[in-house]
Amino acid sequence: MRQPNGQSAPGKAASVPPLVVTDVSKIYTVRGRGRGKFIAADHVSFTIPPASAIGLVGASGSGKSTLAKMITGSERPTSGSIKFGDVAVERLSAGGLRRYHSRVQMVFQDPYAALNPLHTVAYHITRPLQNFLGMSASRASERVHELLETVGLTPAAQYAGKLPHQLSGGQRQRVVIARALACDPELMVADEPVSMLDVSLRAGVLRLLADLRAKRGLSLLYITHDLLGARVITDEILVLHKGRVVEKGPTKHVLQHPKHEYTTQLLDAIATPFATDGAATTH
Amino acid sequence: MTLLAAEKVNVVYEPARGTRIWSVRDVDLDLKQGEFVGLVGESGCGKSTLGFALTRMLRAPARLENGVISFGGVDVASLTGEALRRQRRKGFAIVLQSGMNALNPVRNVELHFSDILRAHAGPGEHYSDAAVRRRGAELLGKVSLEASVLKKFPHELSGGMRQRVSIALVLSLEPKMIVFDEPTTALDVIVQKAVMQTIQELQRDQGFTAILISHDLGVVLESTNRVMVMYAGRIVEDQPSKELVRGLHHPYTEALLGCYADPRAEEIHLEGIPGTPPDLSKPLPGCAYAPRCPLAQEICWKVVPPLAPLGSGTAACHVRAPSAKVPGAQAAAAKAGAGRVATK
C-alpha cells in the first residue's frame, strides 16, 4: 500500500489530539406507554490517547452506539463534556460540527445500508474530497484511485465505476472505509464494522484497519461485541454494561484476567471448539 | 434410520432478464432420524438455497431443476399443492433467518398460533380459542417464554424473544425435520448463546432431525454432531463435528478454521481467506476452490473432485482425499506431498 503523495505521513501522529470524555451521561425520555427515563450512558469517562486504538465492548443496549453518536457530534450528552484537543464537541455549532467532521469520521455497521444504491463507488468517495477539502473534480478523481488502492480494492479503475450492488459485503465495507479516510481524519469511529460480514472476510477488514492506523497515525475507537476483533486491533478496551464502564485496561490483560461478571459472560459466549488450548492446536 | 435422502439436487435461479445462476450443484445428502447437522459456508455458497429446496420453499426465479428428495420414503421433490401442504404437518419445517421479519407486525403471537394450528388442522380436528391458547402457552413454555407473550405484538418483543416465538410456531406442527436458517445471526452474542442452547435442548428432547445453516463455524461445531461444508453450490466436506478441529481437511475447511481464534490466547493469528468465491453464473470445469487454494494441482483445474473418504468422513479434494475413481488424482496427491499444511 503506497502513501498518497505523502499527504498523511506517519509523523502525523504528533498532531492528532487526544479525545477526552469526561463524566458523560445521556438520558433519553421515553414517551407514551411505558414512559420514563432511559439511561443510555451513565457518567462515562475515558481518553483516547493520540494514535491509539480503544475498544468499546458490550452487548446490544449497553450504550456503545450512543457514545459513538455523542463523540461524532450527532447526539449531545445530557451532562459531561467531550473534548477533542481544544474543541468542545458537545457545544459545537452547525459550522463547527462541519469542520469537526473533516477531522472525525465514522464507519457504520451495515455496509449494505451505508451506500446509496444509485451512486457509483467513485461518487461516494468524491463527495468528502470536494466538500471538505475543496478539491477540483480532476484532482478528486485521482485521489479516489489512491484511496481505493489504500483499502485494497485493486485495480482501482475497475472498482471506481461500480454501483454498490455489484460489490460483495466486504468490498462495500472497504468503500465505506475509503470514504471515511477521504478527508484525512484524525479519529475514526468504527461501529461494529465487521459484524455484518462473513467470518472469512472479517480478518481482511480488521487487518486493513490495523494497517491504516499504523501507517496514518490516526486514532481509532472500535465498537463491537466481538472480543476477538477487539483483541486483534485495540490496545485498550472498555467494557460497557447498562451505560456504565464496568471494566477497563489493556485488551490482552482484561481478556485474560476478566474481573467483572459481565466480561466473563461475554467470554463464555465464545464457541467452545476454539476456546482455550483448543485454539492453539489448530494453528 | 434414514429420514431424508437427497440425490443430485440442483437449484437454478432463472430471472426473466439477466443471467442464470446455478446455485446448488449435484448435492447428495443422507440424514438419519434425530441427527443434528450443520451446513456452513460463505455468503452466496448456496446453503440457504439448499435449505429452502429441502423444505420445498423455493419461489421463482429459483427452481429445483432436478433431483430426488426422499423424505420418510416419499419423493417430496415432485409433490405439489395439497399433497405438499400435508407434508408440512408432522413433516418438515423451516425457521427463517430473522425472526423479526418472519412475524406479522399487526397480529399478536396468539393469532400466529391460531393461523398455523387451524390451517394445518387434521380432518375432524377443531381448535377453539381456548385450545389455541392452551397449546400456544405449552409451546412457548418449550422455548422458555411465558404464556403472557401470547398477547404481545412482535414489536413488543426483543430479537431473541421473536426468534424463540418463530421456533415455537414451527414446533406446533410437530415436524420430524427442522431447518434453522441462520437462526442467531442478527442476535447479540450472549442472546445467541441462550437461543442456541434452547435449540439444542429441544432437539435432544423432541428427537427431530435438525439442519443448522450458518456462516459461523464456531456456533455449528458447538451444537451439531455432524457438519457439512459447502462451497460454490457443492458440499466439499462432511465430517463428525468433533473431528473437524483436528487432522487434515479440505483446504477450504482449513481456511475457515483459520478465521477463528481464542481472544484470550497469548498470540493471535487470524488468517482470513484471500480472494472471492467464484461467479456461479459461469460453468466451473474443475474444483471451484482451486483459484484460492494453496495446494491446487493441475488436475484441480480440470476435474470436479467427487466426495471421497477422508478421516472419519468425506471430502471433495484431489489432494487431500484422492478418489480411486478419478484417474490421476492419486498421482497429483503424491506430487503435492500429501499436502503438508500450507496454512501456516
Image (cartoon, rainbow, N blue to C red):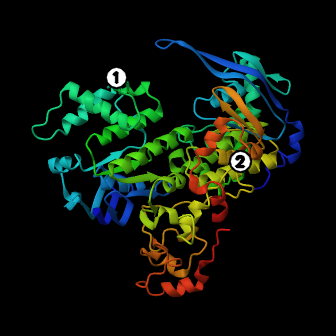
Pick the residue in front: A59 or A224: A59
* Amino acid on which disc 1 is placed: Lys
Q: What residue is pinned by disc 2?
A: A231
Q: Tell me if A153 is positioned left or right of B9 in this view.
A: right
Residue B141, quarter of picture: top left
Q: Residue at x 48, y 75 (%)?
A: B310
Q: Is residue B268 above or below residue A60?
A: below
Q: What residue is pinned by disc 1?
A: B151
Pick the residue in front: A84 or A155: A84
Q: Is residue B62 above or below residue B130?
A: below
* Amino acid on which disc 2 is placed: Arg
Residue A17, quarter of picture: top right
Percent coordinates x, y for residue B66 in the rendering: 27, 64
Q: Quadrant of the N terminus of chain B?
A: bottom left
The answer to whether residue A193 is seen in the rendering is no
Label 1 sits on a secondary structure element that is helix
